[in-house]
Amino acid sequence: MPVPEVAGLAELNELLGCCIREIEMLGPLPASPFPTWEQSTHRVNQRAMITVRRNHYSVPVRLVGRKVAARVGAREIEVLANGDVVARHPWLRGSQLRSVRLDHYLELLKNKPGASDAARQIVDVLMLCRDHDPEIVELAVRGALAAGAIDGRAVALLIDRKTRPPAVAIELPDRLAQHQRPAPSLGEYNQLLDGEAVGQ
């Protein structure tokens, strides 16, 4: 918008008055938001990627061979399967560029033939980040290592303890108070001991 050229403050105020009158003449904003993206359908290739406007974006490997929808916005691309968002990527401006997320390939890495047990445990720890804050996962990894545990199951156990809701105290009825019983006595036992002493 060009900077207005005015002779003085009074003329500038007069111009601003016109702007205010224009605002009053504008219609109200829509009551509900309307989509500002462009949607298209794509088939997921064998590399768990879709091609949108000559660029490639990864999706979860379980979707290979299926059709998904892509919403192209001003800054990002959302990928949907059965109406659920399964991936988000920044919109790449160029050609033949790739946006890949390691998280989309974790199941493939876990079940890779010849993968070592240590590699599978690393994948298990990375998969914990899907359901938990990465900071909590990192703290659990540090805790497991500090305790000398190098097993991914130890990390999962520490996360479970950290995220488990606090225990609620339960009041149990005092069942002993319901039955009036005499205090225990050792009298009969003492009689047995006395009898043994007499027999000797």
Image (tube, rainbow, N blue to C red):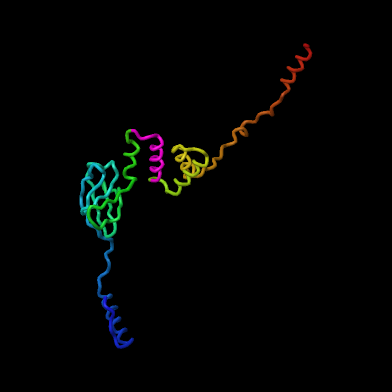
Q: Nearer the viewer, residue 19 or 30?
A: 19
Quarter of image, res 176: top right
- Secondary structure that dominates the magenta span: helix
The part of the chain drawn in magenta is 114-129
Q: Where is residue 159 shown, x and y percent of the image? A: 46, 43
Q: Residue furthest top?
A: 199
Relative to 199, residue 149 above or below = below
Relative to 15, residue 127 above or below = above
Quarter of image, res 156: top left
Q: Where is residue 183 shown, x and y percent of the image? A: 69, 29
Residue 104 counted in the magenta span:
no
Quarter of image, res 180: top right
Q: Nearer the viewer, residue 15 or 62?
A: 62
Residue 116 counted in the magenta span:
yes
Q: Specify the quadrant that holds the N terminus.
A: bottom left
Q: Nearer the viewer, residue 200 or 10?
A: 10
Say whether residue 168 is left or right of residue 103.
right
